Each structure stands twice: as structure tokens, then as C-alpha cells.
């Protein structure tokens, strides 16, 4: 007999499939990419360097132009001040003119300032205060200013081997008057300026001046001068062509083992002569580093590319298949009843979303387990037995259905469960569906209101059937038998929260959190349908032996935005239980979802303290407290309540709706953040 395993087809796991597909994809893409890169590397590198240097050259020129324009504007404004101009042109003593020039220099932040008369004769100069009576009219800078035009350009101080950018403005009494002199201010081209430009352009800059023999010497640099200056002096062809420069002159220098490529531009005087220039340098080695790396890689591309593809595919397969495998194992543990699973998957992709949903599901199961464990902890109580409390006081009238009655030729009445907001509630057996149901009938006196009461009951079923959630008692059908209207709904085999609190007293914090979060989920789905419960209280909340909470009795609920002309609920009429009603409900105001959140806060308060926050001997005393008194801190009744949880409850019970949580989902998240 042949071995079955020998003919069984080999099945590849998810990780293996991802590994093979990713390997082929990465290897193919890598081969194509490396081939194209090898062809384009050298050509692109040279073009990149030239474009970058051209852009930096324009950036440096724009920087100098902007700096000069700002300087010229400030000088022009100062020259138009009559008092300042008069002191410069008509000063009785040269020392006074020098003082005014020094004041102007300090105001501008200039390196120096000089003043000439209408013939271009030097009157005062701040950097050489002893000089005067020197004819400067032959220079284009001064000549243009004495002609009435503002001028700027390079100014070379050969004695100090410094280079400046100078701005000259005419001094005259009015816009139409002939210039009475010239005001010249200059800023230095030095290391500080070079550093400013480097910060703005991220490029090394070297400024140089030309001596009388047209030899360059550095006046400002971001690079070591002793390394750059010899390279500039050696490149005589570039220096010679500088005066004819239009698109920039390429230069080269080796600094600290790096080969630098530069683009030089002249710095001209007002007359157009090249007094110096600047070179923007970029490292050729740095620009080519990536391309050279790729070129070296090409020789090993066939082998290394495949290894890289295999490694990438392996990692990718582990990243995808690994978390899925852990999710599967964790699911099996939860299936076996182990809710202590800690699934540490925090990725932001779909797997992370799935893991987060799984953690939320396990958290819900863990909370239900705590709730079930707590309900089982009473002496002699089995997990399926509800904690029996006192039945609601109710004496069946002649119209009531007695146990054993076959109602509507379908429902076998088993027992009277209690009274609802509008009638009597029974446990019955549905012979057609073969399951237990709850039946709620209208009290005969409720129908005395006429058609409005009947329409209210019909509205109840229309609203309730729109809500489908595990934490809400399901509504089945609306019917009529022998003139009696009734509602059939899910029968909950559990214990009311009121009975649980009455039998056990204050509930533990973990149990209360489990109850609160499930209550919020029930309210959230109801509010999304526009339904407000209006009577949230422990009596209307049941806890099944499985730990699932059920919100019952949506009999007095109505749409949040009901048109006023429907006439089903008259304005000013309050429906509910005063101990759990919001101030706006007690005042007969139109309600929204935040009214239910107020009642939910009171339910949480009672779970932790064993009593509602407001009690009184009469209903009117309770109403007055609900309207006027601030709710007490639950920690005054139970010091074991954590401060954050007390804060959540007090916020839910804020008197003003705007100060409460704005949705059931928001209240749920606040409880979830606690534990």
C-alpha cells in the first residue's frame, strides 16, 4: 500500500510564498536599477556639480546685492534728514563733521564712513580721521554721487589689504537741488561675511582682492587661507579671465585631502573694474561619493544583489508571517480560556490594526471573566443563578396574565417579572420559536389617554427594533390580542445591577469598569440611531451569567430630534426615575445624548458606593438636590476609588451638559484609559 504522505502535495506556507515572491521582485528591480545607474552615473555627477555651483554663485551675488541695497537704503534715508545733512555740509569745524560721520557709521553698522564736499574733496573719514583735503572726484563712485545718482561698488584699501563694498549717496538740500557733497558708507568683505553666506547657502565661500600686479590675496574665507590662497595664486589663467567673466570662471583647489571645484565671479568697482572676486567651492569627492559607490557595487551586483534580495525577502516574510503566526497562537490560547495573552504587536499597518482589535476583544473577555468571577463569589451561588432580590411590588389585577395562561394563542406565560414604564413584563415560552421570550403589555389605564398612548407604544417598537447590539435587549415584535397590545423581546437570564449592588454592596473597581464600558457601548449604538433611553438606572441593566451586560426597557425612549408637532410627548413632561435623571430632564427640557451620560455617571457612582449620589425622604427633595447641589465626590464614601475614576464620574455628572462627556464613545475611552 503506497504511503499517503508520498503523494500528498507540498504546500508552501505564507512566509515561504512571500519570501519567493519578494526575492524575485527585489532581484529583478536591483539588476535593472544598477544597470541604468552605471550608465548615467558619471554624466549626471558632472552636471549636478555645475548646476549646484551656478546656483550657489547666483545665491552669493543675490546675497551681496541685497546686503548692498539695504545698506544703500539706510544711507539714503539718513542723507535726507535736514539736521544731519546740515551738520555734515556746514559744520564750522572738521571735528564736528567727523563726529557726525562716526554717528552715522555706528547707526549703519558700517566699517567706515567718509564725507566729501561738492567738488569731491575729502572732508572727513572715520577710518582715517587724520586725512582730509584729498581729491576723490576722479573715482566713479564719488563722481556718480556728485552727479546726483546713488552708486555702489568695490572699494580697495591697499594699505590695509582689505576689500569693502561702498555705497555713495548725494547730499543736497532738496530733490531738485544740485549735490552739495557725497556721503560714502562701506561694509567689509571678511570672514564674518563669508560665514553668513555659508549659513545661507551651505557652501564654502572665499573672497579675495587683487593687488596692483593682479595677484589675489584672501580677505575673507570659510576655508583655511594657507591651503586656498596658493591655489588661487597658481591659477593665473582663471584670475586673468576674471575681468571678462560673464558665466563664472571654474577653479580648483585641494584642501585637507579633498578636491574642491569652484566657480569664481568678480567683485567690481562702481567704474566696472575687477577689484577682487569670490569663489564658491563644493567638494567634488562628496558629490561623486554616491556615484563611485554605485560604480564599485556594479562589479559585485550579480552576487550581492541576489544576497540582498534573499535577505530582504526573508525579513519581509518574517515581518508579515511572524505576527500572523503569533495572532493564530494567541487565538488558540483565548479559545482555551486563557485571557492573559499579551500580544506585543505595535505596527501601524493592517496587522497592527488586527492586533489592536484582538487586544480589545481579549480585554472585553477578560473584563467579562472578572465580572463572572465576582458574581460566582457569593456563598452558595451558582454562576447561572441570578442573585435574587425583592420582586417589585405588584398585585395582578383581573386584566393581568396569570402563569400558565396561553397568550395570543402562542405564548405560554411562565411568571410575572415586574412592571415597566408602561405596563407589565412577563416571562413566557414562544411555542412557535421554541424559546423563552419576555412580553411587555400596556396597562389598561395607560390606554385611557387615547390614541397618543397607543402611538407612543408603536413608536417604542419602531425605535427599539433599530438597535441591534449584544449589550441591548433585542426587541422582536409588536402585536395585539383580545384588545391588549404587547411587545415581545429577548428574555435575559441574568441579575439586575440593582439586585447585584443590593446583595453585594459596593462593587470592585475592575467590575465597575467592565459594567461602565459595556453600558457605554449600548448607549453609543442607541445614540447613533438617534435614540435616547431617558431612564438609565441599575434596575434597567441586567448582567448575564456570561458577564454580558444588557440594557433593558427602551419603552420611554424617543428620537433625539422629534418634531414638536408629533404630539407624542408634551413639553414640560418628565419621564424617568428622579434619582437618576439629569437636571435638564427634570426641568422638562428637550434632551440629547448627554442626558443619558449623566444617568450613566450616577449608575457608576452607585456601583462603587452602594447608593445614588442624591437621596431624600421625598421625591421632591431628590429633585431639588439634582437641580441645585453639586454631586459628592465618590471617594468620600469609598476611599478605594482611584482619583482618575472619580474624576470621570464627576465629569459625567456635571450639571451643565456642555461640561460632560460629549458622547458615549468619549466616556468609554475615558474608562478604558483607567483600566
Image (cartoon, rainbow, N blue to C red):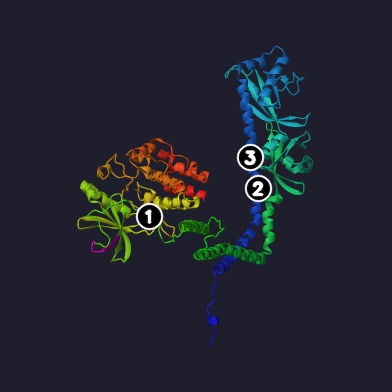
Q: Earlier in the sequence, mark 3 or mark 2?
A: 2
Q: Magenta includes 593?
A: no
Residue 438, picture quadrant: bottom left
Marks 3 and 2 in Cβ contact (< 8 Å): no
Q: Earlier in the sequence, mark 3 or mark 1?
A: 3
Marks 2 and 1 in Cβ contact (< 8 Å): no
Distance between the alpha carbons at the discs numbered 2 and 1: 73 Å
Q: Which one is in front, 375 or 298?
A: 375
Q: Pointer 2: what residue?
A: 50
- Counting other residues with Cα less than 10 Å from the Cα at mark 3, is it few (<14), some (14-19), or many (20 or more)? some
Residue drawn at x 65%, y 34% as measured from the top left: 64
Q: Is there any visible trace of residue 487 in the rendered image?
A: yes
> x%, y% of residue 552?
35, 53
The label on residue 59 is 3
Q: Is there any visible trace of residue 270 in the rendered image?
A: no
Provide the residue span drawn in magenta.
407-414
Distance between the alpha carbons at the discs numbered 3 and 2: 14 Å
Q: Magenta includes 409?
A: yes
Residue 628, picture quadrant: top left
Residue 115, picture quadrant: top right
Q: Pointer 1: what residue?
A: 472
Predominant SS of the magenta segment? strand
Q: Which one is in front, 581 or 334?
A: 581
At mark 2, the secondary structure is: helix
Distance between the alpha carbons at the discs numbered 3 and 1: 70 Å
At mark 3, the secondary structure is: helix
Q: Which one is in front, 376 or 198?
A: 376
> x%, y% of residue 563?
28, 44
The label on residue 540 is none
Q: Is residue 525 above or below residue 57?
A: below
Amino acid at each position: 500500500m503506497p504511503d499517503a504522505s508520498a503523494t500528498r502535495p507540498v504546500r508552501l506556507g505564507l512566509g515561504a510564498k512571500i519570501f519567493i515572491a519578494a526575492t524575485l521582485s527585489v532581484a529583478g528591480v536591483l539588476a535593472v536599477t544598477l544597470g541604468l545607474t552605471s550608465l548615467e552615473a558619471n554624466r549626471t555627477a558632472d552636471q549636478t556639480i555645475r548646476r549646484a555651483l551656478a546656483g550657489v554663485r547666483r545665491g552669493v551675488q543675490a546675497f551681496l546685492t541685497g546686503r548692498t541695497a539695504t545698506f544703500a537704503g539706510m544711507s539714503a534715508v539718513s542723507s535726507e534728514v535736514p539736521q544731519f545733512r546740515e551738520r555734515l555740509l556746514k559744520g564750522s569745524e572738521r571735528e564736528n563733521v567727523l563726529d557726525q560721520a562716526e554717528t552715522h557709521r555706528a547707526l549703519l553698522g558700517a566699517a567706515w564712513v567718509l564725507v566729501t564736499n561738492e567738488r569731491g574733496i575729502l572732508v572727513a573719514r572715520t577710518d582715517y580721521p587724520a586725512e582730509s583735503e584729498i581729491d576723490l572726484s576722479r573715482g566713479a563712485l564719488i563722481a556718480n554721487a556728485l552727479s546726483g545718482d546713488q552708486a555702489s561698488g568695490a572699494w580697495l584699501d591697499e594699505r590695509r589689504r582689505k576689500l569693502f563694498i561702498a555705497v555713495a549717496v548725494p547730499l543736497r538740500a532738496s530733490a531738485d537741488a544740485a549735490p552739495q557733497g557725497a556721503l560714502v558708507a562701506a561694509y567689509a568683505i571678511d570672514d564674518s561675511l563669508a560665514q553668513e553666506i555659508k549659513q545661507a547657502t551651505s557652501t564654502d565661500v572665499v573672497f579675495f582682492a587683487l593687488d596692483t600686479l593682479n595677484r589675489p590675496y584672501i580677505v575673507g574665507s570659510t576655508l583655511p587661507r594657507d591651503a586656498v590662497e596658493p591655489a588661487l595664486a597658481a591659477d593665473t589663467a582663471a584670475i586673468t579671465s576674471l575681468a571678462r567673466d560673464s558665466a563664472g570662471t571654474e577653479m580648483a583647489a585641494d584642501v585637507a585631502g579633498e578636491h574642491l571645484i569652484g566657480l569664481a565671479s568678480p567683485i567690481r568697482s562702481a567704474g566696472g573694474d575687477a577689484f577682487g572676486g569670490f569663489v564658491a567651492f563644493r567638494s567634488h569627492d562628496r558629490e561623486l561619493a554616491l556615484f563611485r559607490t554605485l560604480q564599485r557595487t556594479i562589479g559585485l551586483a550579480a552576487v550581492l544583489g541576489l544576497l540582498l534580495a534573499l535577505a530582504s525577502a526573508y525579513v519581509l516574510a518574517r515581518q508579515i508571517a511572524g505576527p500572523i503566526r503569533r495572532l493564530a497562537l494567541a487565538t488558540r490560547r483565548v479559545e482555551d480560556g486563557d485571557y492573559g495573552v499579551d500580544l506585543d504587536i505595535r505596527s501601524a499597518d493592517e496587522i497592527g490594526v488586527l492586533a489592536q482589535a484582538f487586544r480589545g476583544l481579549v480585554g472585553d473577555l477578560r473584563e467579562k471573566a472578572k465580572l463572572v468571577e465576582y458574581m460566582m463569589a457569593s456563598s452558595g451561588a451558582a454562576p447561572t443563578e441570578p442573585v435574587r432580590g425583592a420582586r417589585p411590588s405588584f398585585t395582578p389585577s383581573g386584566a393581568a396574565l396569570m402563569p400558565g395562561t396561553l397568550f395570543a394563542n402562542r405564548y405560554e406565560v411562565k411568571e410575572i417579572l415586574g412592571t415597566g414604564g408602561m405596563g407589565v413584563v412577563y416571562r413566557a415560552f414562544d411555542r412557535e420559536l421554541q424559546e423563552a421570550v419576555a412580553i411587555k403589555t400596556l396597562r389598561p389605564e395607560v390606554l385611557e389617554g387615547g390614541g397618543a398612548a397607543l402611538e407612543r407604544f408603536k413608536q417604542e417598537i419602531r425605535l427599539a427594533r433599530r438597535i441591534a447590539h449584544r449589550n441591548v435587549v433585542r426587541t422582536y415584535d409588536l402585536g395585539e390580542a383580545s384588545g391588549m397590545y404587547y411587545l415581545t423581546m429577548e428574555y435575559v437570564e441574568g441579575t439586575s445591577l440593582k439586585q447585584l449592588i443590593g446583595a453585594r454592596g459596593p462593587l470592585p473597581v475592575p467590575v465597575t469598569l467592565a459594567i461602565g464600558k459595556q453600558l457605554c457601548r449600548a448607549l453609543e449604538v442607541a445614540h447613533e440611531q438617534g435614540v435616547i433611553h431617558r431612564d438609565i438606572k441599575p434596575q434597567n441593566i441586567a448582567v448575564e451569567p456570561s458577564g454580558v451586560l444588557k440594557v433593558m426597557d427602551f419603552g420611554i425612549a424617543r428620537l433625539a430630534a422629534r418634531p414638536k408637532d408629533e404630539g407624542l410627548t408634551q413639553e414640560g413632561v418628565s419621564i424617568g426615575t428622579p434619582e437618576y435623571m439629569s437636571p435638564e430632564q427634570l426641568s422638562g427640557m428637550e434632551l440629547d445624548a448627554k442626558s443619558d451620560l449623566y444617568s450613566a455617571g450616577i449608575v457608576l457612582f452607585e456601583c462603587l458606593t452602594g447608593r445614588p449620589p442624591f437621596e431624600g425622604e421625598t421625591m421632591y427633595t431628590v429633585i431639588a438636590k439634582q437641580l441645585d447641589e453639586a454631586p459628592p465626590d465618590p471617594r468620600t464614601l469609598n476611599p478605594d476609588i482611584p482619583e482618575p475614576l472619580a474624576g470621570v464620574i464627576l465629569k459625567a455628572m456635571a450639571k451643565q451638559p456642555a461640561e460632560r462627556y460629549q458622547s458615549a464613545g468619549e466616556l468609554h475611552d475615558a474608562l478604558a484609559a483607567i483600566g
